[in-house]
Image (tube, helix red, strand yellow):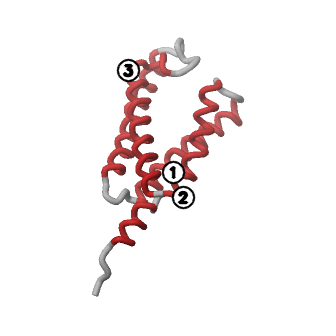
Amino acid sequence: MARTLRVLVQLMGWACVAIGLFHVLLGNAAIPGAGGAGVTVDSWGRFMGAGFAGYGLAWLWAARQRPIPAAAVRVLAGVLLLGAAGRLLSLARYGWPQWFQIALTVIELVLPPVCFLLADAEERVASAHAAPVR
């Protein structure tokens, strides 16, 4: 489980950095259906892309720690779950978005519980291998 956690945390980090930079570089063109949304939405999307890249860097920071800190994984997974809750609020208010946004919502609802379950996997292994205190 510790290996699964490490791979998952690294994948989350690299994916979020890539997605964030994609939004910074492409602006409205990165959001399905937002091509003609105007300069304000473009500016906001690029800014939020930078924030999402930073979120990915936080995942990568966690992946570089030995052991991966369970508290960091739980907080980062909680932020992802909060994003999914925002998408669900939008769905309830405005209806179904473009299909890719639905797929992202499913991922954002499924991954946090997995992260919560695996969060302390490396810490458990590290404590099991620690020398007994005498």
Q: Image point 38% across, 59% down: which residue?
A: 69
Left or right, residue 86 beside residue 10: right
The mark that comes first in sequence, 1 or 2, is: 1
Which residue in the structure is indicated by mark 3?
Answer: 25
Q: Relative to residue 21, is residue 117 depicted above or below? A: below
* Nearer to us: label 1 or label 2: 2
* CA gap, disc 1 and disc 2: 12 Å
| Mark 3 → mark 2, Cα distance in angstroms | 35 Å
Q: In this orientation, which residue lies closer to the viewer: 94 or 60?
A: 60
Which residue lies most toward the bottom here?
134
Tell me if residue 46 comes above or below residue 111 in the rendering: above
> Of the residues shown, which amino acid type is indicated by label 2?
Leu
Crowding near the residue tagged with mark 2, few <14, some 14–19, many ≥20 C-alpha atoms within 10 Å: few
Residue kind at label 1, given as amino acid type: Gly
Q: Secondary structure at mark 1?
A: helix
Q: Residues within 10 Å of mark 1 (few under 14, many from 20)?
A: some
Tell me the crowding category of disc 3: few under 14, some 14 to 19, or many 20 or more residues within 10 angstroms, Cα based: some
- Residue 5 % position (x, y): 45, 52
Q: Are marks 1 and 2 in contact (CB under 8 Å)?
A: no
- Mark nearest the camera among 3 and 2 is 2
Q: Which mark is residue 117?
A: 2
- Return the residue found at the far left: 134
Residue shown at the point (52%, 56%) measured from the top left: 116
* Label 3 element class: helix
> Which residue is pictured at 51% across the width and 52% down the height?
115
Of the two numbered discs 1 and 3 on the same chain, state the one appearing first in sequence.
Answer: 3
- Report the residue at 49% width, 47% height from top: 79
| Residue 108 found in image quarter | top right
Measured as percent of width and height from the top left, residue 98 is found at 64, 23
* Residue 31 at x, y percent in the picture: 52, 21
